[in-house]
Structure formats: C-alpha cells, structure tokens
Image (spheres, rainbow, N blue to C red):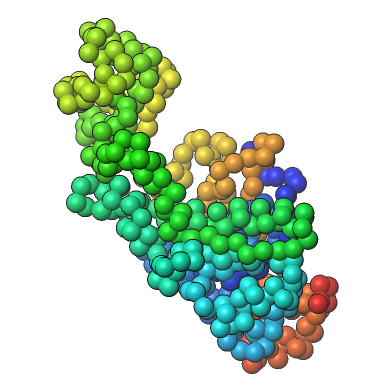
Amino acid sequence: MTKMKVMPYEGIRVVEFTHMVMGPTCGLLLGDLGAEVIKVEPLEGDSTRRLLGSGSGFFPAFNRNKKSIALDLKSAQGREVALRLVASADIVSENFKPGTMKKLGLDYETLRALNPRLIYVSLKGFLPGPYDHRTALDEVVQMMGGLAYMTGRPGDPLRAGSSVNDIMGGLFGAIGAMAALRQRDQTGKGCEVQSALFENNVLLVAQHMMQFAATGQPADPMPARISAWGIYDVFTVKNGEQIFLAAVSDGQWKTFCQAMGWSEWRDDPRLATNNDRVRAREWLIPLLRERLAVHEAAELATLFERHELPFAPITRPQDLFEDPHLIATGGLAPVRMNDGHMAPVPLLPFTMNGDRPGVRLQPPAIGEHTGDLLGQLGYTPDQIARMQDAGVVRAAQGAQPSSTAEGAP
C-alpha cells in the first residue's frame, strides 16, 4: 500500500487548541489528509503526554502529522502570538470547557472579527442546551446515553472498550470542517462547527432507539438480547479456546451444516429459515455448543474460511501488531512514542486510488516547531529569544528559531 501522492487538504492550515482524544482526533484526520496542523500546547506540554495506564498511548496515537508550538496563553504576549497564528489559519479547533476560550479572547465571535473566513470547530461534551454546562467524559455520555446499558449485562452497565465517542466526535468535527470549507468556497465566509460527545453517543444507539419505535419493546443489553440471527455467538471449543461463528442467512446455515456433516439439522424443517433458528435458539445453541466443543479453534477457522462463512478469532489489541492482513496492506506505520522509541500505529481506515494516508510528521516534541512558526509569523530571532527567556514560549531543545518572515500578518 503506497502513501497518498496528492494530499486533498494540502495548503489548509489548522491551529488546534486541543488535548486528550476528541480534539486531537479532529486534527489527526485533517493532518493525515495533508493539512498543516499546528498544535498549540502549554509550556509544559499537553497533559496527555504524561498519562499512565489506559491513557499512555493517547498522544502518539492521535498526534502524528502535526507541528507543536508551546505558548503561555495566560500572558498577553502569548495570546498575541496565538492571534497571529489564527490570522494565518483556515481552521481553528478547540475542546476546552465552555467559556475557557472566551476568557482567553480566542472564542469564535472574537476570532471571526479578526478572520471572517475562519472555520471554528468547537468540540464539547454537549451541543448548546440544558446540559451544556456539565463536564462530560466519554464514560459519562456512555452512561447517560444508553451505550453502557447496551454493552453490559443486565444490571451491570459497562462502557465500551474504546474511547468511541471521543474518537467519533473528533471525526465528526473534522467532517464538519470539511463541509464548512466547501461552503466557504461558495460563500466566501467561514462558520462555526460544533461536535459533541453526547450527541455522538445518541447516534451510536439510534438502532436501539428505533428498535423500540418499530416494535414497542425495549432493546435488551447486548449480552441478553434476542439476536436477529440464529447463529451469531462466541463458542468455547477444545482446550478452552474461543471463536466467534455466525451463519446469518439460510444459505450459510445449509453450508455450515453440510461442512460439519450435520445433514439432520440441514434438513430439519424447524430450522429452515433464519427466524426459525432464532425461535429455536433456546434448544439449538446449547446443542451447538456441545458439538463444537470437540473441535479446535484453528480447525473451525479453516473450515469457515474455506466455505466463506463469517468467523473471527478472539484477538487482544496487542496481537494486532502481528496481524498479517494489517502488515500486508500497510495498515500500520511506525510512530515515535512518548519515550522516544518507535512503535506501529494504525492508520486511517481508507484508501484513495489505492493510496493510504500515512505518517508525514512524527508526533512532535513539546514546542518542536516553535522557532520556525514564530519566524513565519514575523518575529525576529532576538524577539523569539526574549520570549523564551520571559517564559512566553518554549522551543524544543536543540531547535533553532527561523528568521523567515513569510506569512507575517
């Protein structure tokens, strides 16, 4: 798989005031597609760089293809630098608490007056309304938005095993920015784009909401649900291994039975259609578990693959580094981790003309591009040095400030 030769958003400048996952994901998509993404960090750097446990991979996962400038936004001179950056930008994105950007003088109304063509992406917990004052996290909106209820067992709500709302909310913010760019081509004006965790979560559970609208029956949590398909389960097989197997059509059921040598089930009128098999699950699934328990998972995988039936091994995230399909298709690319060592990261899951958006810039060190960016904004090396001495900006160790004044407002 080759990297994209033509970058769709080359020439677009994005200035992001973001941290954690939702905001950086928005910039990730735009940066992977060729935009120049400038990450504005506090002098000590994005706090995501220092997270432990489940957060230890956040920064390298969501901050490739970006430049870093480290500013003290609480200082007047730091805000002046930020405003110069904004004046040169096509898109600004932020995911701070409501009111934070206004206190800094970096809210949409203020910046629109400075740059009427600006597209301002605000990534929040909630869209404007009764909840917008609340502090939201992915887990918060999963709990209040029905997703944790659907994921866990009855009486045991459980968040999904990934930051699904943070990631998807960031992607929807980027999609909104893309739409706003197209609108700007037509009108000459920018606009504000808003994306939110809660509303994203509601979209994720729309199918369950509409199940109730269609049937009048509440959707049961996924572990207790009545499946729409007769065979659609994880089975424990020989040596305690597990494998997911499915037969979701009548043709797949007949193929499955024939491959296993179960002609009596293939021809059983009680199991003729998928809905028949759904109604028969109470007695069919226990018998199926018994029959499958004597087979090895690899044996079943080989059989299902040969007969083009749906199956899946039960894979841990760390196993994906060795996945032959990801390796063969270029789905992983090396990125620099927080401690400096390199590790493969998943790329965006699409191609354009066979090309995959890749890694052009490694996740930046704190302030790695401060000097160059300040030079582009018209600051002289002496001015940059004085700002560093005053604690207004931070440049990465060893980075040299640029003397170019290109792009100065």
Q: Measuring from the top left, give residue 249's x and y in whole percent.
A: 38, 20
Residue 113 against residue 268 in the figure, above or below? below
Give whichever of 122, 399 is nearer the camera.
Answer: 122
- Give coordinates of residue 197: x percent, y percent: 45, 59
* Residue 17 seen in the figure: yes
What is the count of numbered marks? 0
Q: Where is residue 271 in the image (x, y as percent from the top left)?
A: 25, 15
* Direction from residue 34 to residue 286 in the image, left or right: left
Residue 394: x %, y % from top left? 62, 81
Above or below for 325 versus 111: above
- Residue at 25%, 53% (x, y): give it: 157
Q: In which quarter of the image is residue 404?
A: bottom right
Residue 22 or 320: which is nearer the viewer?
22
Q: Residue at x 32, y 29 (%)?
A: 228
Work out which quarter of the rendered image holds the C terminus and state it.
bottom right
Left or right side of 113 for 26: left
Vertical relation: 363 (above or below) 228? below
Q: Is residue 201 left or right of residue 401?
A: left
Q: Which image quarter: residue 11?
A: bottom right
| Residue occupying the point 41% across, 45% down | 206
Q: Who's the residue at 81% across and 72% down the image?
A: 407
Image quarter hosting the N terminus: top right
Question: Quick one: 112 or 160, which is closer to the camera?
Answer: 112
Q: Is any part of residue 135 visible from this angle?
A: no
122 up-or-down from 292: above or below: below
